[in-house]
Image (tube, rainbow, N blue to C red):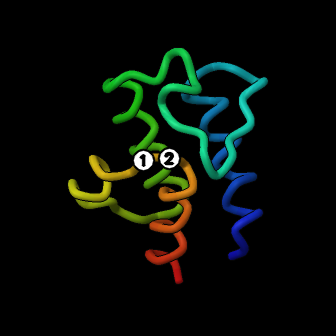
Amino acid sequence: MKREEIFERLNTIFRDVFDDEDIVVTETTNSDDIEDWDSLEHINLVSAVEKEFNIKFNIAQVTGMQNVGEMVDIIIDKIG
């Protein structure tokens, strides 16, 4: 799966989780960029991403991700 395809799928997930059709995630998007992205929504987001890509993040990955680009790197590694 190409990086661009993953971003397209992540955009859909982010829009659904945060109920905002205007969200467009990029490599550098992080929790400071999305108003409602708090610890609870982070869990909802991680769960939705895991379900969409049929993967499981470990706790170090969940807590260590600094931006969406790092999330994509992990997804690519897991589905690769």
What's the CA distance linking mark 1 and mark 2? 4 Å
Q: Quadrant of the N terminus?
A: bottom right
* Marks 1 and 2 close (CB-CB < 8 Å): yes
User: Of the residues shown, which amino acid type is indicated by label 2?
Assistant: Asn
Q: Residue furthest top?
A: 35
Mark 1 element type: loop
Q: Residue sitting at 46 percent across and 24 percent down?
A: 37
Q: Give the residue furthest to the bottom.
A: 80
Locate residue 61: give its quadrant. Answer: bottom left
Q: Position of residue 43 (x, y in %)?
A: 34, 35
- On screen, residue 34 versus residue 48, left or right, reads right
Q: Which mark is residue 53?
A: none
The residue that disc 2 covers is: 67
* Label disc, if present, on residue 66 of the rendered structure: 1
Q: Relative to residue 34, is residue 60 depicted above or below?
A: below
Please report the residue visible at 50 percent of the width from the left and 66 percent of the height from the top: 75
Q: Is residue 35 above or below residue 4?
A: above
Residue at the spot 31% in from the left edge and 50% down from the top edge: 62
| 48, above or below 21, in the image | below
* Crowd around label 2: few <14 · some 14–19 · many ≥20 (10 Å): some
Mark 2, secondary structure of its residue: loop
Kindly identify the amino acid type of the residue bearing the numbered disc 1. Gln
| Residue in the image at 39% along x and 33% along y | 42
Q: Position of residue 32 (x, y in %)?
A: 50, 26
Q: Nearer the viewer, residue 18 or 29?
A: 29
CA neighbours of label 1 inside 10 A, class few (<14), some (14 to 19), many (20+): some
Q: Nearer the viewer, residue 57 or 61?
A: 61
Residue 77 point in image, percent of width and height: 47, 77
